[in-house]
Structure formats: structure tokens, C-alpha cells
Amino acid sequence: MDEIFHMGGYAFYVWSAYGAAFAVIVALVWHSVADYRAQTRLAETLEKAAGGRVRRAAHLERETGEDAS
Amino acid sequence: MTISELSLCARDLACERGGRLVYDGLSFSLKGGEALVLTGPNGAGKSSLLRQLAGLLDVTRGEIALEGGDPERTPGEQAHYAGHLDALKPSMSVVETVIFWRRFLGSIPQGAETALEALGLLHLADLPVAYLSAGQRRRLSLARLIAVPRPIWLLDEPTVALDAASVARLLGLMKGHLGQGGMIVAATHLDLGLEGAKTLRLGAEVAA
Amino acid sequence: MTISELSLCARDLACERGGRLVYDGLSFSLKGGEALVLTGPNGAGKSSLLRQLAGLLDVTRGEIALEGGDPERTPGEQAHYAGHLDALKPSMSVVETVIFWRRFLGSIPQGAETALEALGLLHLADLPVAYLSAGQRRRLSLARLIAVPRPIWLLDEPTVALDAASVARLLGLMKGHLGQGGMIVAATHLDLGLEGAKTLRLGAEVAA
Amino acid sequence: MAAMNSPTALQRFHAYANPARFMALSSRLVAPLWILSVLVLGAGLWFALFDSPPDYQQGETVRIMYVHVPSAWLSMFGYGVMAFASAVGLVFRHPLSDVCAKSAAPIGASFTFLALLTGSLWGQPMWGTWWEWDARMTSVLILFFLYLGYIALWATIEEPVRAARAAAVLALVGAINIPIIRYSVVWWNTLHQPASVFRMDGPSIAPAMLLPLGLMGVGFTLLFITLLLVRMRAEVMRRRVRNLRLATAGAAAEG
Amino acid sequence: MMRAFLALLARDLRLAVRLGGGGGMAVFFFLIVISLLPLGIGPDRALLAKVAPGMLWVALLLAALLTLDRLFQADYEDGSLDLLTMGPLPLELVVVAKAVGHWLTTGLPLVVAAPLLGVLLNLPGEAYPPMMAAMLIGTPALSFLGAIGAALTVGIRRGGLLASLLVLPFYIPVLIFGVGAADAAAGGFSGEAGRQSLLLLGAVALASLVLGPLGGAAALRANLR
Amino acid sequence: MMRAFLALLARDLRLAVRLGGGGGMAVFFFLIVISLLPLGIGPDRALLAKVAPGMLWVALLLAALLTLDRLFQADYEDGSLDLLTMGPLPLELVVVAKAVGHWLTTGLPLVVAAPLLGVLLNLPGEAYPPMMAAMLIGTPALSFLGAIGAALTVGIRRGGLLASLLVLPFYIPVLIFGVGAADAAAGGFSGEAGRQSLLLLGAVALASLVLGPLGGAAALRANLR
Ligand code: HEM
Ligand SMILES: Nc1ncnc2c1ncn2[C@@H]1O[C@H](COP(=O)(O)OP(=O)(O)OP(=O)(O)O)[C@@H](O)[C@H]1O
Ligand SMILES: Nc1ncnc2c1ncn2[C@@H]1O[C@H](COP(=O)(O)OP(=O)(O)OP(=O)(O)O)[C@@H](O)[C@H]1O
Ligand SMILES: [Mg+2]
Ligand SMILES: [Mg+2]
């Protein structure tokens, strides 16, 4: 185990590389998921608040084939 | 082909801006010699409609057709558009401006004076545009209508900043254009004084 | 000091622009609660006079004095100027715009809604300015008048691009301001409907 | 492509690309994909760190390869996805491909950054320097710039439709540029330093190293796809939020 | 159509001259950047000679970048661009006219000024002809590629910096082959390497003559509605 | 008055961020310029290390110059500047707010990014601390001196290039002392020379903090009427 940790004297480089990869990937995953959650929550509250008007927005969405724009 | 055989039709037009539907199901048709006046409250979509007709804004749904026009050119390329922005360069002189647009839009450069005369700008011909007052600028940007003949005029609040004499002059020019079989679509909040013009009121009743 | 004791005087004012004398020997005086309407053909110097009053254009000759005002501030610093340019940032939202001007011109940021309400913009509060139509922009730039109280309003063609309802609303605001002892100098080509306002007609267009 | 042009095929394409359908389909895919990526990456990591031999030349540092090379692959794969989606978006005008291109960019940029960073961390023990202006490294750096420019363009244009088209043009022109950069950099380098001391291709790979490398490569790719789906879902929701906001703001009648 | 093209080109040149010197300004900027360099890296003449071709090219790129926002931004802001799309000239040719105007007011004057600056940087004599040739071939590419970046950022106020960022990666091949041509001569390699660089530079320039108008027009279309 | 100052500063920062990333964009530009250099002068590591401090400073100046037109031009064109002069805040403080905003969105991020770029240019380790110190002291001077140039050219459309030209001479002392501080450390001189450069740089920066607002406000007054 110690050997693995030591990495033949190159511990700093190897573990930094893996650490950095881990950090970047975790940040990316966290950001993506958090963003998705936040947007979903926002959409829900807005839909609730807008009440009847949602139907109009949804209608527009369907008609234009774009829920974008 | 004389321009009086033209007709401009919009069928079931819709416009979406910034994710909102500004108008929907809008239709009209206009023949040579006819004018259409667009009215309605702020934000009703008058400017948007003019830009769609000019080909400067995507048509969300529906269609715009010019019958009897040059089939190789879009309706926008057979129209003049005078919007809120005046497309003037402060460092060019008044006459240079008109000459440039004549050249660019495909006329010969000679005869620019006629257009300046028609808008009462001849005495300012050599002044740089930077020195013009608001109304003078407006008149210069309208001079393009006369400088290059095109069958359709799309005018967005054309009388803004004009004094009474200039408004009268513009009215005369518009009548002359209609008399030659041209078409005008103009957005305005005031009465333009074009008798016999069709009116299209945008706003609450159009909202989907 | 209440603002109704104010008086704004121009004595023998001249204005030179681009090497030409636009007007000369112009005088007027205005007391709190009074309005002055500037009329005249394009290029007569209406906008120039307003900019001189706002301190944005050098006074060639003559003088402008505000009596009864804050002696430590220039007349311009006690005035609102609403000119042809609207000083709006497309990427700021409507309410952010008003809040910024309240802060910058020295009021507390709270209460921006009152100004938006007064100009019928409350429902657009969170929209970016880039999305506004011409008339909506104009109304937002006029909202500054209400957002921060200042005794003098200098308005250059304030009704441009406004629909009928908004013109009526603006008229109401102007009357309210005069009623509180404020002063208004407004340039216009149309009838503003301000009864009892003084009128100053500037000269005919100067030939080159 | 010819079939695409017939209206029915196009309609079918649009039906599949419909955002609502996409949301329904992707919601079923996301969870399994997460699990699969974690499993493959876990296995890959085990082999990479514990169950593969050190290299006879590079020693233990060779283990950096198992994150470096997959990152480098994905940096290019990401641009490919972005450019392809942009082309589809420009031709078929479908918002979902714009969403896909937009969502791929930050992921691709992150992997590009990782390739640069891990390469740098490998370079110091191997070559004695963090950074070398060598052809491959330089072209990856420029690829990173292209990603950043693409992201910046999306960020600055407010209106999604407009932003999508402009960004698509950039991605496509950039796609043409990448091989040019690659070759020009190779050229430039050999011109100055005819005999490079460093061997970029490394030793031919032993089977014992191929297994972890392959697992990590597959794992990274799965992760990429999962992240892409999640980001696309977030983007679709963001647009829905935007529409709802505008609808509420505009619904109060004018005047 | 030809008349419209020439009218637009002539207008752009006139505006460039009136708005403060067109070419003169770019040259002046180039001059200052080049004279900043010795201040930055010290007055060692051998060192200067070594970095001279590269520095000249980098300064060239920067001068081109700095002037990119002149291409479309002003026309967009005052509404001229709307009207330019409504004329008989295809949008691609509008972009060509603009790019040619940009080249005539920045690239060309810089090429003319470059030898003078070479002297300031102690550039060896044999490097001049290939360097000039490379600049003549390479600068149009800078303008045409720049047009893409300028068109992409046209709706954005103060988009100048963003345009620079977007365009810089596209300038890299031009830079590398351009420097390659001059360096080969200066470094005493056989003419072969230099000639090859020039050929590649020519290929990049030709590609940009096609790509610039197409990409620029596509970007303008995206941004204008 | 304090409230007005902060409101203006906050607005400028917000606009900078919305219009595409404020600081991020400047850093990105800086990064690209710095990576163009090796492409221009070749990948020779010793040569790169030698020119690194000078190049970092030149790139810093350019990034600052390129963003100068953000200072007043937009506010002039849309009429905001007229209204800013009519508020309670003296014009000098308006200039200070603008310059501070400019520094926060360009100078500061660049200082933070500089070490990373040092690595790319193979800058020797001992040079980092004095270089960072010099940049922290010198970059505010760039923003404050830049304000004068931006104010002088405010009425001129596309005045960006002219502003750069006017300002560059003022930047030269900053460049010389800034490079001096980093070079002294890198070149292994005694600390004395470096310290002296830093002191002189500090003096220049202090002078610019006074000169910038006064000169800028005077220039604005001249241009606005
Ligand atoms: C920041 C510096 C570096 C960058 C940007 C970089 C970039 C890349 C790229 C793009 C690839 C994939 C190329 C392909 O598959 O064709 C790659 C593969 C590879 N790199 Fe790096 N690299 C860097 C540093 C290093 C270093 C220092 C080493 C080892 C001493 C190294 C060893 C390898 C190996 C062994 C491969 C896989 C074999 C191959 O596909 O040729 N790299 N690198
Ligand atoms: N920036 C300027 N430089 C030089 N001369 C100018 C400038 N602006 C206006 N002028 C000239 O000053 C005169 C008065 O212009 P001003 O804008 O005050 O007119 P105005 O009465 O507001 O006209 P309008 O009704 O058209 O708005 C005009 O003749 C105009 O040509
Ligand atoms: N660039 C834009 N992006 C998004 N939405 C916009 C944009 N321009 C206008 N809108 C919105 O579209 C609607 C119609 O605007 P338009 O300018 O066509 O109105 P208008 O009828 O011309 O009004 P006005 O009388 O004020 O000129 C408005 O509600 C406005 O908020
Ligand atoms: Mg309108
Ligand atoms: Mg006026």
C-alpha cells in the first residue's frame, strides 16, 4: 500500500494528476446536476405562480416546435 | 411590368420576440396605390411587423408574398425601410450620403439634388451630417425614398421630429408615390392625413 | 426654501454651433409652476437651447441664472434633461435602470416602483431594456423625472414614440410637477396640451 | 442525407428531436448511465492504480497516462460533437441540436483543460519541464482557446436563437481550422527544432496497460455522454424558465 | 452590382480616412508597439534580431485585431447594416467589400511600413524580401478571417475584445507560416523551407478568401434578425 | 456622494460582467497574446525566459489598451455621460469610479493570471514575487492614465485606436520600471536595482492617481460641450 502511495518517488505528480482529474470531474458533475436541479425548481415555481398563463406559454412552445427562442 | 400591378399579401403572420408572441394570425393585402397605416399602443408590434416585411426579422409563422414584383428579388429588396435608426454617418456630408445610397441601391449618382430638394435639404447639401438637427437628420434619412425608386415604402413613425412644414412635404411625397402605383406601410401614433388608407390596429384585440 | 420660490432667467442668450450663429439675443424668465414651450422649425435651435440650460453646451453669449435654487449647484444640477438619446443600457433590466439613477442622483433606491407605475412600466420591470419597443424605451427614460425629484424639467420632444395613453399620462405628470411648483421647458412640434404655458417660438431655419 | 430532405423524414427527425420527447427519453437514460459510468470508471481506476505494472522507462509516472490519454481523446471528441450538432442546428434549424452543442462545450473544455494539466504534470518528471512549445501541446492549447471563445460567444449573446446560430458558425469555421492549426504547428516546430529530444508517442503499449487505458477511455466517454444529457436537460429547463418569465412579464396587458 | 460594390468600398475608405487617418493610425500603432518591444526586452541587438520577424508579425496581428471593430459595428449601431442587406449586393460581397476596405486601410499600410520597423529591430538584410512577400500574402487573410469574428460579435456593444478572442486562433496558421518564411531566410536555412512556408501561407490566404465571406455572411445573417 | 460613487461603480461592474465576462475576457485575451509569442519567436526555452518579463508587461499594456474604449465611449454614445455630469458627483470622481471599475475588470484579473502565463513563458522562479508586486502597483496606473486618453477621444466614433496612441507614451514609464523590477530579480542582480524600480513605479502610480482624474475630467469637460 505504502508503495502505491509513494509511486516510486513520483507521488506528487501522479497523485496531483489523479487529484486534479477527480476535482475537475467532480466540479463538472456538481455544476451540471446543481444547474439542472435549480432550473427545474425555478420552472416549477414559475409554473405554479403563473397559473393560467402556463397554458399559453406551453401552447407557444408546441406551435413553434421550439421551447427555445 | 408596371408597379401598379403589384400586390403585397401577408397571410396568417405571427411574430415572436424574446420568447413572447407579439402578434399572431395577422393578415392583410395591399395593392399598388394603396397605403396601410399601422396603429396601436406601444409594444403592440408595429415596428416588428415592418421589420418582418423588410426581411429584417424572422417570420415565426405565416408568409409574406409580393405578387407581380421582380421574382428574383425578395420583397425586402424591393422595399425602402425607414426605421428608428437613421443609417447616417456623421462625417459624411448631406449630398455624399444621398449619392452613396443612390450608387449602392443601384441608381446613377447624378440627380441626388432632386431628392434633397424634395425634402428641403438643398441648402444644407454640403454640411456634414454631424451638424444636423434631429428633424434635419430625419429628413435626410427619408431622402432615400426619393433618391432611389422602389415600389414599397416601409415607414416607422416617419413624422417624428419633423416640423409642420416638413410633415406637409412628406405627405405630398407619399401621395405622389401612391399616385404612381406604389405602396406604403406606415406605423404611426399620429394622424398622417393619408385619406383612403387602410388601417390595421395592432394590440389587445390581436393578442392570442 | 420651497421650490415654488424659484425662478429661471435667460438673458440675451446666443448660441453658436459649427461656426454658425443659431440664435442670438434670446431672453425669457420662468417662475415656479410655469412651463415654457419651445417651438419652431427644424434646426431653429430648440435642442440647443435645452442643452445650454442643462449646462451641456457652452453659452456663447448672455447668461442663465437660477434664483432661489441651491446656490452650491449649477442650474443643470438641479434639472432633469431628457433629450433625443435615452441613456439606457440594453443589458440592464427596467427596474435596475431606475434604481441606478435613483442612487446616482442621490435618492434612496427604494421606491423605484412608484416611478415605473407612473409611466405604466411596472409589468415590464424585470425585462431587459434590449427587449423594449421604442415607446417603452422612451417611457423608461422619462421615468427618471419621477424617480428623483428635481425642480426643473428640460424635455426635448417628450411625446415622440408615445401612444395616446402614454401622452395623456405624461401630461398628467407634467401638470402634477407644475402644481408642486416645478418648472418645465419643453421643445415640441406638436401641441402638448399644457394650458397656460408660455410659448417661445425660435426663428426660421437659418440658410447656409 | 438525401432521405432527410423528404418532408416525412424531416418531420420524423423533428418529432424525435422534440424537446418534450427528449426530456421523457433522457429521464429514463440518465440514472443507468450514471451507474454504468461509475462502474466502468471504478474498474478502470482499480487497474490503473493497483493492478498494472509500472513502465520500464517511465516508472510509476506512466499511471498518469490513464487519465491523460482519455482526457485528450475526449477533448477532441467533444469538439466533434459540438461541431456536428452545430451543423445539424444550422441546416435543420432545430433548437435541440443547439442545446446539444451548447451543452457539449463546457464538458469538452473541461477535458481539454485536464489533458493540458495532466500532460503538464507528466512533462515535469519526464522531460524536466512543465510546458514545452511542442506541436501537439500547442495545438491542444489552441483547441482550448476555441472552446473558451465558443463559450464566451454563447454567454454574450442574450437571445438564444441568435446566439445558437452565431455560435454554430464559429464552431464550424473552427472545425475547418483545427487540422490547419495542427499541421501548421507541426510544421513550425520541425522548422525550428528538427530533431526533437522528446518522443511524444511513448513506448508501444503493453497489453497490461491496454486494459486500464481502455476501461478509462470507455468510462470517460460514458461520463461525457451522461454529463451531456444532464446539461442538455438543464438547458431545456433554462429555456422553459426564460419563456415562463417572459410570458408573465408580457401577459399584463399593455397601456 | 459592381457599382454597388465599389460604392460601398469607396464609402468605407472615405470614412476610414475621415475618422482619423485610416492607415496612418494603424501604422502609428504598429510603430509604437514595435518601439515598446526593445523597452520591454532590453536593447541587446543580437536578441532583437532573433526575435524581430516574430515580433513584427505579432504586432501586425495586434494592429489588425485592434481595428476589427471598425468592420461592422458602426454600421450595425446606426442601422446602415440593415439597409446594406436590403440592397442588390449579396451579403457575401458586402463582407468582401468591407474586408477589402479593412485591408487597404490597415494591412497594406502596415506592409509598407514594415521595412522601416525591421531596421529598428535590427532585422538582417536577407530577411526583407521574404518577409515582405509573406506580409503581402498574409495580411489579406487577416482581414478576411477578421471579418468572421467581427460579424459574429456584431450585435454586441463593445464586442471588440470578444472579436479579438474569437479570431486569434484563426490567425495562428498565418502567424506561423508568415514567421516561417522570414525566419528561414534570416536563419540561413536553404530557401526551400522559406518557399514552402510561403506556399502554405498562400494556401491559408486563399482558403480565408473563401471562408471569410461565407462565414462572415452566415454570422451576419444569424445576428441581424 | 459616496452613494452615487458606489452606484456608478457597481453599475459599471455589472455591465462589464453582463457584456461578456468582464475580467474573464481580458484574461483570455492576455493568455492568447502570451501564447502567440512563442509561436512568433520560436519555442526556444532560453530565449523565451529572457524575454518573458518584457513580454508579460507588453501584453498587459495591450490588454489594458484594448479595453480603454469601454471607459467612456458607450456612455457618451447613448447619452448617459450627459446625465452623469448633471449628478451630484464631481466629474473627477466620476472618472475615478470609471477607472477603478476598469482596473477591477481588467488589471486585477490580469495580475492574478500572470503567474500561470509566467509558466508558459518559462519565467525563472525568483522573478515571480517582484513581478507580481510590480504588476499590482503598476496596473492601476494603466487604468488611471488610460482614462485620460479615453476621455480625450470620447466624442470620436471608433476612437479606440486614437486613444491607444495618445496613451501609449504615458505607459512607457510604467513599462520600463515594471520590467525593471522583474528583470532585476530574474537576472540575478542584487535586490537593490529591483527595489529602486519598484519605488519609481510606485511614484508613477501615485502621480497617475492624481493626474488621471484631473486630466480625465478636464478632457471630458472639453469634449462634452
Ligand atoms: C500539456 C501537455 C500535453 C498535451 C496537451 C498532450 C496532448 C495529448 C493528446 C491530444 C493526445 C492524444 C493524441 C492522439 O491520440 O492522437 C495525447 C496522447 C498521449 N500523450 Fe500527451 N500531451 C501532453 C503531454 C504529454 C507528456 C508529457 C507525455 C509523456 C511523457 C505524454 C504522453 C502521451 C501518450 C503516451 C499518449 C498516448 C499515445 C498516443 O496516442 O500517441 N503527453 N497527448
Ligand atoms: N453637433 C452640432 N454641431 C454643429 N452644428 C450643430 C450641431 N447640432 C446642431 N447643429 C446646428 O444647430 C442648429 C440648431 O440645431 P438644434 O438641434 O438645436 O435644432 P432644433 O430646433 O432642435 O431642430 P429639430 O426640430 O430638428 O430638433 C441647426 O442648424 C444645426 O444644423
Ligand atoms: N429586440 C427585441 N428583443 C426582444 N423583444 C423585443 C425586441 N424588440 C421589441 N421587443 C418586444 O416586442 C414587442 C413589440 O415591439 P415593437 O417594437 O414591434 O412595438 P411597437 O408597436 O413598434 O411599439 P412602439 O409604439 O413603442 O414603437 C414589445 O413588447 C417589445 O417588448
Ligand atoms: Mg416601434
Ligand atoms: Mg431638436
Image (cartoon, coloured by chain):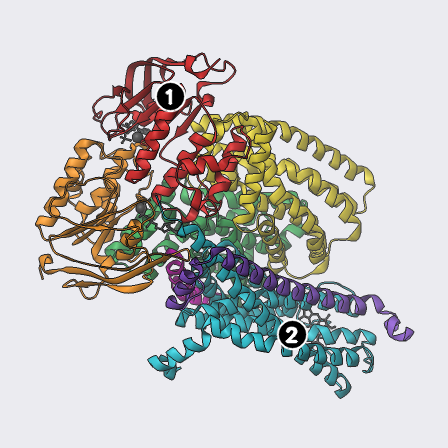
Chain colours: A purple, B orange, C red, D cyan, E green, F yellow
Question: Which image quarter: residue E144?
Answer: bottom left
Identity of the amino acid at label 1?
Gly
Residue linked to disc 2: D223
Q: Nearer the viewer, residue B205 or E9?
A: B205
- Quadrant that contains the C terminus of chain C: top left
Q: Position of residue E62 (x, y in %)?
A: 53, 51
Q: Which residues are magenta?
A: E201-225
In this rendering, is residue F3 above or below E196?
A: above
Identity of the amino acid at label 2?
Leu
Residue at the spot 63% in from the left edge and 31% down from the top edge: F208
How packed mark 1 is, by other alpha carbons closer than 10 Å (few <14, some 14-19, many 20 or more), is some
Q: Secondary structure at mark 2?
A: helix
Residue linked to disc 1: C179
Q: Are marks 1 and 2 in contact (CB under 8 Å)?
A: no
Q: Is residue B24 left or right of residue E204?
A: left
Residue at the spot 49% in from the left edge and 41% down from the top edge: C95
Q: Chain of mark 2?
A: D
Residue E203 highlighted magenta (yes or no): yes
In this rendering, is residue E30 above or below C175?
A: below
**For the image shown, how many numbered marks are present on the structure?**
2
Q: Nearer the viewer, residue E176 or B175?
A: B175
